[in-house]
Amino acid sequence: MLRHLFSIIMIFVAAVCPAADEVDAIAAKAQRFFNYGEWPNAGAMYSLLIDARPTDAGVYGHAIVVAAMQGDTVHQVDLTHRALKALVPVDSIFASVERTSFTVGQTSLYRDYLTVMKHAEPWLTRTVNGYLLRYYTYRRNAPGMIEMSIEMLRGLPDDEKFLYPLAQGYLMTGDYDKAMAAYSRIVNVNPRAYEALLYLGNFYASRAEADATSRAMAVDYLRRAAEIKSTPVVSETLRSLTSGN
């Protein structure tokens, strides 16, 4: 009786779980359809592949990008929910979508997917904003860097990881006063923040000729930077600023 029951179970498993070589064949077909941009066929293959490999973040990443190429945001959300239910880490899902969208040369798909997930799952907002900040920083998108830095700073107002891209974003837009305010916040949090000290020192040095207060601030910031790491450029700038004193 037990042997008969075991045989039935094995037949059932064989029916619902394709053999390894069959799964490999499905994966090969999925990749081929993906490479040639045959999105409906690729989507069908990745659906089968997810059944066989329900915890494979790479498969979900490809399937989500395929859905994006077809404009199917609902399916993107469904695929993400399925991955999460299979206990695939959300960071792994996002990283896979990022790699895959970059592979097809459509980086905006990744940005749009993150935005879709932020609206679909509000509990992911902070995680998504962190990924969007990294994306905008990589793309040198100043407005996006500023917006996402501000969002991230709401929870951690003194975090250098978010203050630096905020300052850089303002620099890229030409808003130097706000950029220096961000660098000042960094220095207040970390008095030995070398990069911030240099930016502040050089900024105020550029105004030193017409403004004694700016000269004094430049000297202060650059001296503090020199104490951390002296360079010929910093030394020469300090000598020029103080030679008339």
Image (cartoon, helix red, strand yellow):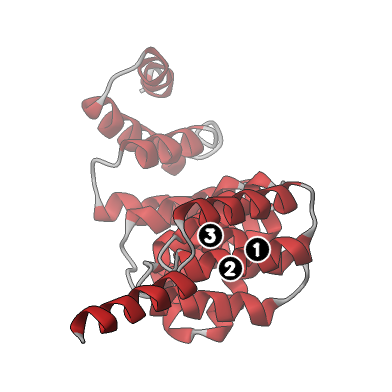
- For residue 135, say whether it is visible: no
Which residue is disc 3 drawn over? 59
Which three-letter amino acid code belongs to the residue tagged 1?
Met
- For residue 188, say whether it is visible: yes
Which residue is disc 1 drawn over? 45
Label 1 element class: helix
Which residue is painted at 65% across and 63% down in the image?
45
Q: In this view, does 103 lie above or below 18?
A: above
> Mark 2 packing: few (<14 Cα in 10 Å), some, or many (20+)?
some
Closer to viewer: mark 3 or mark 1: 1
In the rendered image, which quarter is residue 239 located in? top left
Which three-letter amino acid code belongs to the residue tagged 3?
Val
Label 3 element class: helix
Image quarter where the N terminus lies is bottom left
User: What whole-number distance in Å separates the C-alpha atoms at marks 1 and 2?
Assistant: 5 Å
Which residue is disc 2 drawn over? 48
* Front position in the image: 53 or 187: 53
Mark 1 and mark 2 residues within 8 Å of each other at the beta carbon: yes
Which residue is painted at 34% across and 52% down in the image?
186
Label 2 element class: helix
Residue 98, image x and y in percent? 56, 54
Residue 123, image x and y in percent? 42, 84
